[in-house]
Image (spheres, helix red, strand yellow):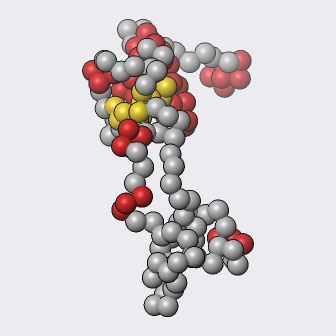
Amino acid sequence: MSGPKFKRQEQAKVKRLAGKSYRRPPGSQSKIRECRRGNGPMAKVGYGGASEFRGMHPSGFRDVLISSLRELDGLDPKKHIIRISSTVGLRKKAEIIKAAFGNSLVVIGSKRIVREAGKKAAGIKNHLKEEGKKTTAPVTEKKEAEVKK
């Protein structure tokens, strides 16, 4: 994307402001706020980026918000990356992540959520396998000795 790189007022004088995000200059006598010549551009509506790049993730893919498995249909892994909605529970997130990896789609968002969803999916599968069986905890020698006393 082309266009001016907006700089904060006083960024040359105050080291901590250099390279930080742009803020509109305050002050009634600010030369930048008054748009005087030689003071650099101020961010305005007319400096918008190209329309084909708006709404894109910085990686260059289209960011798509997903809240169900059906929404994965028709997504192209060469064009789209997915972000899972925060209202989706862990079980459904695990299913969406598994389906997305199967379709070679990239899931963005918190790595913690992806990790937890994977663990939760494994736990749910184990729970469903053992649902019909009664599981008993393994008895150790110490527990046997305590029971005999």
Near-viewer residue (130 or 64): 64
Work out whether 118 lies above or below 40. Answer: above
The residue sitting at the bottom extreme is 29
Q: Position of residue 121 (x, y in %)?
A: 46, 21
Q: Residue at x 55, y 71 (%)?
A: 40
Can residue 20 be seen in this snapshot? yes
Near-viewer residue (5 or 141): 5
Q: On the picture, is 86 further left or further right than 43?
A: left
Near-viewer residue (55 or 75): 55
Q: Which residue is drawn at 51% across and 31% down?
A: 114
Q: Where is residue 62 in the image (x, y as percent from the top left)?
A: 41, 33
Can residue 145 be seen in this snapshot? no
The residue sitting at the front extreme is 37
Count of numbered labels shown in the rendering: 0
Image quarter where the C terminus lies is top right
Q: Residue at x 40, y 54 (%)?
A: 48
Near-viewer residue (106 or 139): 106
Q: Which residue is drawn at 63% across and 78% down?
A: 10
Q: Where is residue 50 in the image (x, y as percent from the top left)?
A: 40, 45
Q: Position of residue 95 (x, y in %)?
A: 39, 21
Q: Quadrant of residue 87?
A: top left
Work out whether 13 lies above or below 130. Answer: below
Q: In which quarter of the image is residue 6?
A: bottom right
